[in-house]
Amino acid sequence: AQSVTQLGSHVSVSEGALVLLRCNYSSSVPPYLFWYVQYPNQGLQLLLKYTSAATLVKGINGFEAEFKKSETSFHLTKPSAHMSDAAEYFCAVSDYSGNTPLVFGKGTRLSVIA
Amino acid sequence: EAGVAQSPRYKIIEKRQSVAFWCNPISGHATLYWYQQILGQGPKLLIQFQNNGVVDDSQLPKDRFSAERLKGVDSTLKIQPAKLEDSAVYLCASSVRRGVDTEAFFGQGTRLTVV
């Protein structure tokens, strides 16, 4: 069985500060890992994904994440927060086949303070 | 390419009533998912289709929920009768695998309120 744990249900940062959202996964097989963003009353939008290629993955809107197998982590970072980054962020895992459904974490709500 | 289409966007019903949601996936996507997202939680898989066959419905409350994907394209999810705890956003997603690359695309969801 696969699972993800997102540390911190709510993270608040100042505009221009570093954003760090934490995700740890559990998987008995090589995982595929994803970060999605959800704005109010919207569906989920893919930010970035790890599918066994480069361990440092760059996504949209300046976000990136690093796959660390030894730490079973896939933390999301952005060097400088913007007001428009305020949203709910979800980490998700599937197996290397890519055909299994995504298993999501509980989400982290990011607030950006002016 | 057009995204995943869902309707309606919002629905309010009384408990014990029935409701149906519709999803049209991205053209060519063989895999279709229905997720339930309760307020403050991450999406939880209800059912996964591969073409018109069910791959995984282990978390679908089959006493009240049903889903079908006739002809392997669009899909409907039905709840009958609804309970208060069914209030949630129901998300439809579709995916396609190209080599080692895979990505699921989500619709905007249907927000269900049961009163």
Image (cartoon, coloured by chain):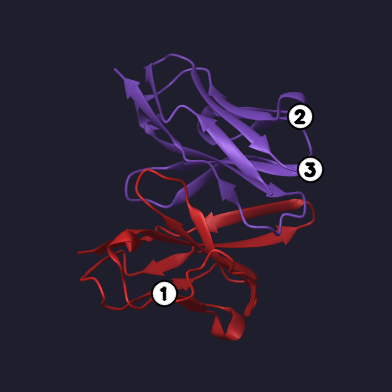
Place of residue B1 in the rendered image (x, y in percent of width and height, measured from the top left): 54, 62
Q: Which residue is mark 3?
A: A30
Q: CA distance from mark 2 to mark 1?
A: 39 Å
Chain letter, disc 1 residue: B
Front-lying residue, A99 or B95: A99
Q: Give, as a three-letter code, the residue at label 2.
A: Lys
Q: Which residue is mark 2?
A: A69
Location of residue B80 by image quarter: bottom left
Chain letter, disc 3 residue: A
**How many marks on residues?**
3
In the image, is A29 to the left or to the right of B42?
A: right
Chain letter, disc 2 residue: A
In the image, is A14 to the left or to the right of A19?
A: left
Q: Are marks 2 and 3 in contact (CB under 8 Å)?
A: no
Q: Quadrant of the C terminus of chain A?
A: top left
Element under disc 1: strand
Q: Give, as a three-letter code, the residue at label 1.
A: Trp
**Eyeballing the image, is B81 above or below A37?**
below
Location of residue B40 by image quarter: top left
Front-lying residue, B113 or B10: B113
In the rendered image of the structure, the colour used to display chain B is red
Q: Which residue is mark 1?
A: B22
Element under disc 2: helix
First in sequence: mark 2 vs mark 3: 3
Who's the residue at 20% across and 71% down the image? Answer: B14
Front-lying residue, A84 or A89: A89
In the rendered image of the structure, the colour used to display chain A is purple
Who's the residue at 49% across and 47% down the image? Answer: A45
Who's the residue at 47% across and 49% down the image? Answer: A44
Q: Residues within 10 Å of mark 1 (few under 14, many from 20)?
A: some
Place of residue B89 in the rendered image (x, y in percent of width and height, measured from the top left): 37, 57
